[in-house]
Every structure is written in C-alpha cells, then in structure tokens.
Amino acid sequence: MPRSPTSSEDEMAQSVSDYSLGSESDSSKEETIYDTIRATAGKPGGARTEEGQGHMLVIRILIQDLQQTKCLRFNPDATVWVAKQRILCSLNQSLKDVLNYGLFQPASNGRDGKFLDEERLLREYPQPAGTGVPSLEFRYKKRVYKQSHLDEKQLAKLHTKANLRKCMDYVQHRSVEKIVKMLDRGLDPNFHDLETGETPLTLAAQLDDWWSRHT
C-alpha cells in the first residue's frame, strides 16, 4: 500500500495549488515555495526536527545547476522527502521549478543511476562502501536513459516542439501504441506543454476513462 503523505507534504501540495491559481510572477511563486518549505521543515516530522534525532549520516550533495557542493547531515530513518527539505533549507540561491528537483544516485558497481523515491527512507539506498563521504546529486528530474547506444544529437532532434505537441495529441486521443513508440525512441515525457502548462501525465489523468482502463 502506498504511504500516506505527511502533514508537511499535504501543506506543500496545498501551497502549490493555491499559488498556481494566482497571478504572481514566477519569482514570487518561487519565493512562496521556499517560504513554505522553511515553515514546514520546522514542524514535527520536518527536516529540522529530524536533523537532531538518532544516528546522523553525512552525505556530500552535488548541485550542478548552482555549481555548489555541500556536506549535510541526514537522519537515515527519515524519508527522502525530508532530506530534500533539508537541502532546500540550506540553499542560498533559488532554483527554478525547485519542486521538480530530486536526489539522484549516480551509477556505481554495475548499478544504473536513479532518482531516489521521495516516499522511501534514506537508509533504503545504501551508499558504495569504501569511498569516503558518500555523494548524491541534487538535480532536475529528467528521464534516466539506460540504453548506452542513444545519441545526444538524436535525442535533441526528438525533443522538438512539434514532437512534444504530437505526444500530447497522442495522449489526448489515447493512442497508447504511438506513445510507447515515442518513448522507445527516447522521448522524455517529463515536459510541460508551453501553451497549457500540462504534462503528459497530468493530461492523461484528466481523461474520463483513463483510470478505468489502467487500474
């Protein structure tokens, strides 16, 4: 069974819903997100509360978009979501669309790189032994490609406005086979439609019979 969201996650979701309906500028919206994160982090179950509990794990966090590296202490028995709050509270610069950033574990020892599931506990992702201070990346969530043969130039050509619009049309018309073909070619479905602000997933979730066909 999926884990129920914590109260801080509920408040974050409500905050995002509230400001997304307003007319604030992008910078004001980002500030609203950071203010909410700082407020919820100090409440029971939040990042600052967890920081002083039990055995602490020191992890080096690489933030390439800010060209920063931080060594922070985390409670391994807290969720990845709480660890994410801890990182956001430590930043002295803003990141655009920060809620779509996540903790990424680079490939090592034959294991593929992956984003950490924010509902799982941090200790469920053991770090490579014998490498000193363990490291994670804090980066914007994008598709992680496991195919070694994919060419970056070909991927760039695939992600044109026309192809992204075509993908949204396929979702709208429930053309599952065509969507699968685009994904197999390397399309990253984690994009926002510039006209509507929707993503393929949010658009699919709004289709009347989507859940009845896929649950």
Image: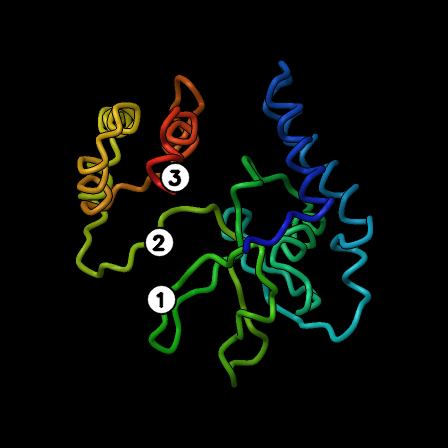
Local SS, label 1 = loop
Of the image marks 3 and 2, the number of the one nearer the N terminus: 2
115 vs 93, nearest the viewer? 115
Residue at mark 3 to residue at mark 2: CA–CA distance: 11 Å
Residue underneath mark 2 = 144
What is the crowding at mark 2: few (fewer than 14 residues within 10 Å), some, or many (at least 20)? few
Residue 128 percent across, percent down from the top left: 49, 78
Residue 42 percent across, percent down from the top left: 81, 49
Residue at mark 2 to residue at mark 1: CA–CA distance: 9 Å
The residue depicted at 35 percent of the width and 40 percent of the height is: 214
Check whether the beta carbons of the residues at disc 3 and disc 1 lie within 8 A of each other: no
Residue 112, numbered label:
1
Residue 164 percent across, percent down from the top left: 28, 29
Residue 205 percent across, percent down from the top left: 42, 31
Quadrant that contains the N terminus: bottom right
The residue depicted at 57 percent of the width and 40 percent of the height is: 98
Amino acid on which the number 3 mark rests in the picture: Asn
On the rendered structure, is 160 left or right of 30? left
On the rendered structure, is 101 left or right of 202? right
Of the image marks 2 and 1, the number of the one nearer the N terminus: 1
Residue 190, numbered label:
3
48 vs 204, nearest the viewer? 204
Residue 55, numbered label:
none
The residue depicted at 60 percent of the width and 71 percent of the height is: 123
Quadrant that contains the C terminus: top left
Residue at mark 3 to residue at mark 1: CA–CA distance: 19 Å
What is the crowding at mark 3: few (fewer than 14 residues within 10 Å), some, or many (at least 20)? few
Extreme-bottom residue of the structure: 130
Check whether the beta carbons of the residues at disc 2 and disc 1 lie within 8 A of each other: yes
Amino acid on which the number 2 mark rests in the picture: Val
The residue depicted at 35 percent of the width and 54 percent of the height is: 144
